[in-house]
Amino acid sequence: MNLDFVEKFDELEDRFYADPDGTKESIIKELLTIHMAIEDEDTLNRFSILVSSRCGGIYIPYVFWDKLAGFLTSPDERAYLQEIINAFTQGDFEEEEQRKMKPLLITYVANEKEFEINKLFTLIIEKAHPTVKEYFSKLITFVQKNVRSTQMYKDKFDMLKNVAPDFSLMSLPISQLREKFQRA
C-alpha cells in the first residue's frame, strides 16, 4: 500500500504543478476519497506523513484534522501532529491552507501541554520562514488572550471531530453548527 501511495502522490503532484489553480480542488477530492477509504491505523499514519509533503501541502489541513481528533482522545497522536506541523511550516504556506489550519491549530494549542508547544516552537517553528513564525506566534497569543473564542473553536471541533474533514462546516457559526447537528 505504501508504494501505491507514492505512485499516486507522484501522479497527483505532476498534475498539481502543471496547473496548481486548476487542479487543486480535484486533487483534494481524490486525496479525501483515498483518506476516507483507509481502514487501519498504521496505513492511515503512513498516508498522513507521506501526503503532508506533497502538492505544496494542500492536503495538510485534512490529515491534521484527522490526527487532531485522535490526539484529543490519545496524546500518543502528538508525534504525528508535530510531523504534520513540520511539513506545514516547510510547505508552500498558502493563504487557503493557513485559513483551514487556523481553527485546528488553535484547538491543538489550547489542548496541548505548554512544554510541548514550547518544544514545537523551538525545534520546528523557530527554524521556519519569518512569516511562518509570525503566523504561529499570533495563533499562540490568540489562544492565551482570547479564552472565550478559543473555547468556541474547541467546542466546534469537538462537534466535528468524528466527521470527515469539512471546512465549510468548521466555518459556520457555532449556533448554526449546533442546530445542524440537533436536526441530524
Image (cartoon, rainbow, N blue to C red):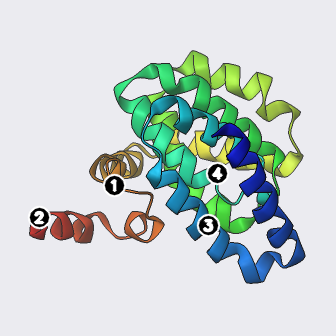
Q: Which residue is mark 4?
A: 60
- Residue 138, percent from left and from top: 66, 47
Label 1, residues with CA under 10 Å away: few <14, some 14-19, many ≥20: few
Helix, strand or loop for disc 3: helix
Residue 164 in percent (x, y) is at 40, 57
Q: Nearer the viewer, mark 2 or mark 3?
A: 3
For label 2, the crowd category at 10 Å Cα-Cα, with few meaning under 14, some 14 to 19 and many 20 or more, is: few
Q: Amino acid at mark 3?
A: Ile
Instruction: Report the residue at 44% width, 34% height from top.
Output: 40
Q: CA distance from mark 2 to mark 1?
A: 15 Å
Give the residue at x 74% y 36%: 86
Name which of mark 4 and mark 3 comes first in the sequence: 3
Please state which amino acid type lies under the numbered disc 4.
Answer: Ile
Q: Secondary structure at mark 2?
A: helix
* Left or right, 168 with reference to 117: left
Classify mark 1: helix, strand or loop.
Answer: loop
Cα separation between marks 1 and 4: 17 Å
Choose top left, top right, bottom left or bottom right for residue 129.
top right
